[in-house]
Amino acid sequence: MLVFRCKIINVHFPSSLGTFVKHLPRSKPKALFPSQIFNSKSVTTNTPDEFRSSSHFETLNSRQKDQIHLYVDALLQWNQKMNLTAVKEVNEVMERHIEDSLAIIPPIQNSYTSCCNNSFDNLRIVDVGSGAGLPGLVLAIACPDSEVTLVESMNKRCRFLEHTVSLTGLSNVHVVRERAENLGQDSDFREKFDVAVARAVAEMRVLAEYCLPLVRVGGLFVAAKGHNPHEEVRNAERAIKLMGASVLQLCSVESHSPHGQRTAIICLKNHTTPRKYPRDPGTPIKVPL
């Protein structure tokens, strides 16, 4: 069971990041996970009993649950020959990766529909530094009407992502092997996405330069972070502003798991990103803004 609390904060950070708290509804989403028919091979990964009560996983329909099972099974198998995750057990993958990835959907949906004045359907989503497909592959399963682009620079991880996309029968996913800095300067990708997401990639100053050039004006950049990212967000204020965006809100996701609270940092793209950003590959992480 998860509880969401969103703090609405100002663009210029005071000593406190905000005092207004908004509770996101915990009722089962009606349009978030539409039903579809799924034909698949038999699933070998079982859902642990202790995880069955999780509100987000249980919101998925049977097709989507089967796709999650296939994904988790492939992740653990491929993880034996390459470094995709430090997690080795099914229940940990479900709790730490799957549930965490699903947990950012309600805050994104709430922010997008209320601040971007658009429907949450048919979004163009980009997952920057997708790695093992977290959260991008999970979002693609949960939101089949959206187009999800997984950006990953390592060839072996791209092979895993392509294998998993084929295995799960996902038709709404594109895997792109490229550095974020190059993609942000490519006219086919620059400012083409409604939402950019990143999880466990880099600090906020770096993520802002990786992700925000890919987001259209009026779109969102969402960074999945730990329980207390306030100082990191304050340090990234200048970088976010330079990219043409502002921090919209911090949404706390309090998980009743050993891994504790998570935070979704949601930024709104207000203006076009200056053409000089992102800088050359390697520069954002070596010389953060």
Image (cartoon, rainbow, N blue to C red):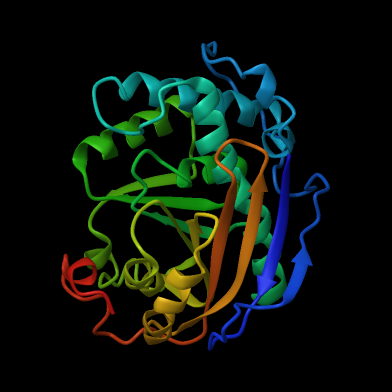
Question: Considering the image in quadrants, where does the N terminus appear?
Answer: top right
Q: Is residue 236 visible?
A: no
Displayed quadrant of residue 283: bottom left
x and y percent of residue 252 in the render?
Answer: 64, 58
Tell which of 190 and 196 is nearer to you.
196
Residue located at (50% from left, 52% from top): 147
Residue located at (68% from left, 54% from top): 106
x and y percent of residue 210 in the render?
Answer: 32, 67
Tell which of 86 and 179 is nearer to you.
86
x and y percent of residue 129 in the render?
Answer: 33, 52
Return the residue found at the far front. 15
Return the residue found at the far right. 27
Residue located at (74% from left, 37% from top): 55
Is residue 201 shown above or below 52? below
Residue located at (60% from left, 79% from top): 16
x and y percent of residue 155 in the render?
Answer: 20, 40
Q: Is residue 244 visible?
A: yes
Q: Is residue 247 left or right of residue 34?
A: left
Is residue 48 shown above or below 276? above
Q: How many marks?
A: 0
Q: Is residue 68 left or right of residue 202?
A: right
Question: Considering the image in quadrants, where does the C terminus appear?
Answer: bottom left
Tell which of 189 and 260 is nearer to you.
260
Q: Is residue 72 left or right of residue 189?
A: right
